[in-house]
Amino acid sequence: TLDRAGASVLFRVHEEPDGDKVKDFAELAWSLGLKLPKTELTPSWFAGVLDVAKDSSTEYVVNNLLLRTMQRARYTPTNYGHFGLAAEYYIHFTSPIRRYPDLVAHRVLQNLLLKKTGKTGKGSGGKILPAGVNAEAAGTFLSARERVAVEAERDVQARLAALYLRDKVTEQFEAIISGVTSFGLFVELADCLISGAVPVSEMKDDYYRYDNKGHKLVGERTGKSLRLGDRVQVQLDQVDMLSRKVTFSLVDQKEK
């Protein structure tokens, strides 16, 4: 309705994912043993991937990695559609936290309705944005402020996670390997999804090499592999309250 009326409104757009990122994801998923549908940049393909991974041992990791292929949603007066929702038009209209883009949509709609009915009064012909601010600039600014809010939320979560774990050093947890690098593993605790690292320097039972193609660490002597999605038992070794970094070690290697 707003678009057909030619109203300048802030769309919530979500453009299609980067093709190279999707290709990299597909190769990773295949290395995990998932049989994916033929790769296409369509919402239905992404839904199909989620169906394939559902109830599998790698479901959690695949869902997170698939999410990382997505572009960041943003606000703009130019409509590009919303890929994630498979919607041709999408705006933020209402929210429990009352975002400013919601208010912009309310003002635009109010002006259109008052104009259509021929009524005048409070709100009739009111300004949509502050003086000297156009819709493009507003969209850019509000998208940037959203990212600031997200970073603040992540910082608070990291602080609370460190606070929760600081008196649990030496305790053991079940975890999921969420990342593999040449310098170690990233894990997320299965019960509370708190993230931490397992440095390869602390893996004393073998010398582990990073298999980039297989997204795993492989023990040179034992052939033991640690790959994305594997469930492991970890021990909490250190919590740095200043940096909010959490360090674990693998339990089976502690016992050797």
Image (cartoon, helix red, strand yellow):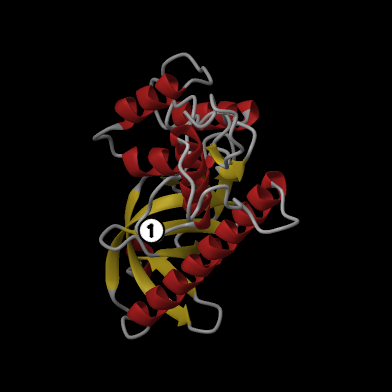
Taking the image as drawn, is residue 34 in sight? no
**Which quarter of the figure is the C terminus placed in?**
bottom left
Quarter holding residue 17: top right
Q: Which residue is mark 1?
A: 188
**Nearer to the camera, 40 or 112:** 112
Above-or-below relation of 99 to 162: above
Q: Alpha-carbon neighbours of circle 1 within 10 Å: few (<14), some, or many (≥20)?
A: many
Counting from the top left corner in percent of width and height, residue 209 is at: 57, 48
Residue visible at 54% across and 56% down in the picture = 207
**Nearer to the camera, 72 or 92:** 92
Can you name the residue that lies furthest to the top here? Answer: 38
**Nearer to the camera, 202 or 75:** 75
Total numbered labels: 1
Q: Is residue 53 left or right of residue 246?
A: left
Can you name the residue that lies furthest to the right here? Answer: 132
| SS assignment at label 1 | strand
Above-or-below relation of 181 to 201: above
Quarter holding residue 191: bottom left
Residue visible at 28% across and 70% down in the picture = 172
